[in-house]
Amino acid sequence: MQINVLTLSLAAVIMTGCASELTTPPSPELAAIQDNLVGIWAMTPLRNGIANVVEYGADAKAKLHSFNCAEPGKRQEIEVSDFKVSEDGKVIHLKSPTDSVDLKVLALNPHTMKLAMDVADQRLTFNYVKVSNVAPLCDLYQNAAAETARQTPFKSGDFMPDPVIPKHAGIERYIGNWTDDKGELQVEVVMDPNGSAYLYMASSKNWNYLYNDVHWVGDELHFQSYAYSDLPHLYRHPYHKSQTESILQPTTDGTLRYSIFIEKLRYEFMLIRSASQK
């Protein structure tokens, strides 16, 4: 399976690399949002260790300080951007010399802030705490040891593959190579000459794919998918050694509903069988 799960972590980096621009408040509500926003905000560390700090200024400028708790010695230059709050106070428009994006304000008070960004039908959320100094919240980072272990070559004990699909009535509805309409998601169910079905995905230039815990819940095919790279420069990539709970379910129109679970949230996509196998 070729899942664009890596988009999530890349989007997180883009989001924290942006800032926004204030306008004259037309209402007390917007004034309160702007007053609360001004200051130094430290992001709760992400699973990959990213824990950036952003200074939002009253001059509609923001300074991004990049930190990664998994790589404490690595620093980048401060990035200065503009920011602007929407009239209803629900969106922060971010604009840097190289990018532009909107963040939804889910919660904001004098001490904490929660922002969201929608990427490829998925919602990313980020939590911030207002602080007095520019410093990352690495004391809150619980995955330091796990992240260090993840950034290593794949070993056989990291994930035990078992892609065989148990026998089930109507298995022919699943057989084939399935993709979404953009070609970004891919699932392949193969039937061997002995009549056994299994999940399969050929390795790409960067990634290898494995499966296990394949079982039926009614007519739903549940399984765990796993991706890893043999390339050392990708060991730090969030997709390396990533494991995803997945579900395939046939529909009445001959397509497959493909569900994946990320951070306990369910995302659904419709897949069609490749033309050569219809």
Image: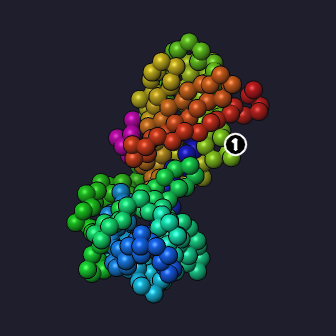
Q: How many marks?
A: 1
Provide residue 72's location: percent of width, then percent of height: 31, 72
For the point 47% across and 67% down, the residue is 89
Q: Residue furthest right?
A: 276
Instruction: Determine whether 259 is above or below 74 in the image.
Output: above
Q: Nearer the viewer, residue 3 or 233?
A: 3
Q: Nearer the viewer, residue 202 or 123?
A: 123
Identify the residue shown where x is 63% and y is 18%: 172
Q: How is the image coloured?
A: rainbow
Q: Position of residue 257 (x, y in %)?
A: 58, 32
The residue at 48%/63% (across/down) is 90
- Does the magenta-highlighted stretch encompass residue 157? yes
Residue drawn 65% across the image and 40% down it: 180
Residue 231 shows in the view: no
- Where 168 sits versus 104, above or below? above
Amino acid type shown at disc 1: Asp
Taking the view exactly as shown, the residue that stands out farthest to the top is 169
Q: Position of residue 246 (x, y in %)?
A: 48, 35
Tell me, yes or no, whether the highlighted magenta stretch contains residue 277. Answer: no
Q: Is residue 132 above or below residue 226?
A: below
Given the current orientation, which residue lies at the most extreme left position? Answer: 139
Name the one closer to the observer, 202 or 39. 39
Circle 1 sits in a helix, a strand or a loop, which is it?
A: loop
Q: Horizontal and vertical percent for residue 273?
A: 69, 31
Query: Mark 1 packing: few (<14 Cα in 10 Å), some, or many (20+)?
Result: few
**Magenta residues, as a range?**
155-160
Q: Quadrant of the N terminus?
A: top right
Report the residue that reaches farthest toward the front.
27
Residue at the spot of label 1: 181
